[in-house]
Image (tube, helix red, strand yellow):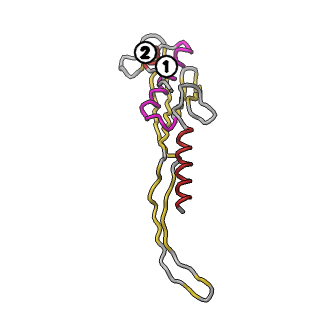
Amino acid sequence: MNKLIILAAAMSLAACATVGPANYGPADPKGFGYEETRIESNRYRITYRGSGDMPPEAVEDYALKRAGELALQNGYDWFRVIGRNTTGEQRGGVGIGAGVGGGSYGRSTGVGVGVSGDLGKIGGRDYFTTRLEVLMGEGEPPEDGDFYDASDVVARIAPAVIE
């Protein structure tokens, strides 16, 4: 039993070692990074999936950065976020449980009460995904102040350095 627990812990640590922070860029084969869908000529849906080492704020920043890049690439000066959703899920880790029970052995019968409990997951990681729907525009931005300057966003949100 102890060997099984040690093996499970070692596998959990190995899994953690293979998943690092996502570099900023298009989605990789594991799905980390950005994807976009053009809905109309000046409207996009942008999704950024962060790896287990990225806090939700960084994932949201990277989605905004991609929105700014798309605006500039398409000749727009600013963009407005008209829909925003950030979700998280926990993946990986080792689940541990405990239980007690009884059984029947040949001519003897044992009566017992089973007890079970979940002691939680150990070593799991939180993965965050941000989805934005953005509307882009040219020239002077709206007067209500509910917009982002595309050039400013791209310049200020720098990708994290991965070592």
60 inside magenta stretch: yes
* Vertical side of 37 occupied by 69: above or below: above
Quarter of the image for the N terminus: give it. Answer: bottom right
The residue tagged 2 is 152
Q: Secondary structure at mark 2?
A: helix
Which structural element holds mark 1?
Answer: helix
| Residues drawn in magenta | 51-75
Extreme-left residue of the structure: 144
Q: Badge 1: few (under 14), some or many (20 or more) residues near its Cα, within 10 Å?
A: many
In the orientation shown, which residue stands out farthest toward the top?
139
Q: Is residue 25 above or below residue 118?
A: above
Q: Quadrant of residue 156?
A: top left
Q: Residues within 10 Å of mark 2 (few under 14, many from 20)?
A: few
The percent position of residue 157, horizontal first and vertical second, equals 44, 21
Nearest the camera: 99 or 11? 11
Q: In this figure, what is the number of numbered marks?
A: 2
Of the two numbered discs 1 and 2 on the same chain, state the one appearing first in sequence.
Answer: 1
Q: Which mark is residue 68?
A: 1
Residue under the point 52% across and 18% down? 69
Residue 112, percent from left and from top:
49, 80
Residues under numbered marks 1 and 2 in contact, where contact means CB atoms less than 8 Å apart: yes
Q: Amino acid at mark 1?
A: Gly
Q: Main secondary structure of the magenta part?
A: helix
Q: Residue at x 53, y 54 (%)?
A: 6
Residue 46 lies, in percent from the top left, at 53, 29
